[in-house]
Image (cartoon, rainbow, N blue to C red):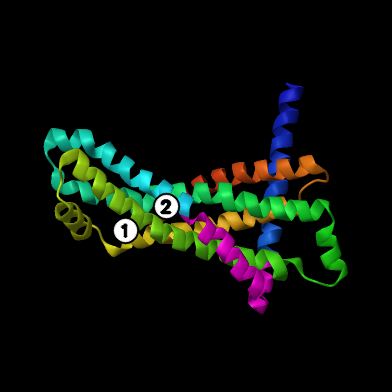
Amino acid sequence: MLRLVTNVGAVALNFVTETGGISLVLGRMFKRLFRMKIDGDEFFRSMRSYGEQSLLIIMLTAAFTGVIMVLQTAVYVKKFGVYDLVGWFAGFSTFREVAPLLIGLMFSGRVGANNCSELATMRITEQLDALRILALDVYELMILPRTLAMVLSMGILTVFGNLMAVLSGALSARLLFDLEYNTFFFSLFDRLQPEDYLIGIEKALVYGFVVAIISSHFGLNAQSGSRGVGRAVNAQVVACAVALFCVDYVMTSLIR
């Protein structure tokens, strides 16, 4: 019983500590944001690294997402003959839920881990301390530009991902059901509303922000030693995955 109480207390204390650390990063970042002090070079470098270089893996993820959404409907489409609903179902589930969440998880695994490992390495090699000694603000130079870059990159990647998911879904529907492309796209555009698409984009922007804050927190607070970088990246990936599902639940409950 004593060991159980100790373990529960340790988990609770660790949760409170990490939550407080994330809140501090968030507050310090917003403080610099209101001053509008952003390093432009770091922002554009991050946009290229986080957006352009992530495009291929995101497009592949989205392509399989569209195919899977159509495959999920295969049984019911053939059973009830509702071929005119294939485009609607594939687009509705992809735009509002599946694509933003899957892309967010891929984004946290690639971009979040990259940001966390860079910051953790700079911390254990005392590069961050050197910047502070030179009276340079780490948040203005690195955290804020990278956060804005992650938010914008996540939104842009989701737009391209949605397009790829729709195209791959239409192709798989053609191969599986011999469904004409015009029937698929008519079902998609006729039954879906603009807000169905915009909700997914809103979620993607929030997911990008969540990944940026959590990865920055674990990177800035990495423990010394090479193992500290590994622990920080591992903790970041797990925390981002849990946070994305929690945020998705909250946003889905509030936005219907």
Count the numbered circles shown: 2
Callout 2, which amino acid? Met
The residue pinned by badge 2 equals: 59
Q: Which mark is residue 57?
A: none
Q: Is residue 220 magenta?
A: no
Q: Examine the rendering and report whether any part of residue 254 can be seen.
A: yes
**Magenta segment, prevailing SS (helix, strand or loop):** helix
- For image coordinates 85% across by 56% down, the residue present is 126
- For image coordinates 76% across by 52% down, the residue present is 121
Q: For numbered disc 1, what is the local secondary structure?
A: helix
User: Which residue is nearer to you in this view: 152 or 42?
Assistant: 42
Is the residue under label 2 in contact with that under label 1 (CB below 8 Å)? Answer: no
Left or right of 164 in this view: 182? left
The residue pinned by badge 1 equals: 196
- For image coordinates 14% across by 44% down, the residue present is 83
Range drawn in magenta:
28-55
Left or right of 152 in this view: 180? left
Q: Examine the rendering and report whether any part of residue 89 can be seen.
A: no
Check disc 2: other Cα within 10 Å, few if <14, some if 14-19, many if 20+: many
The C terminus sits in image quarter: bottom left
Q: For numbered disc 2, what is the local secondary structure?
A: helix
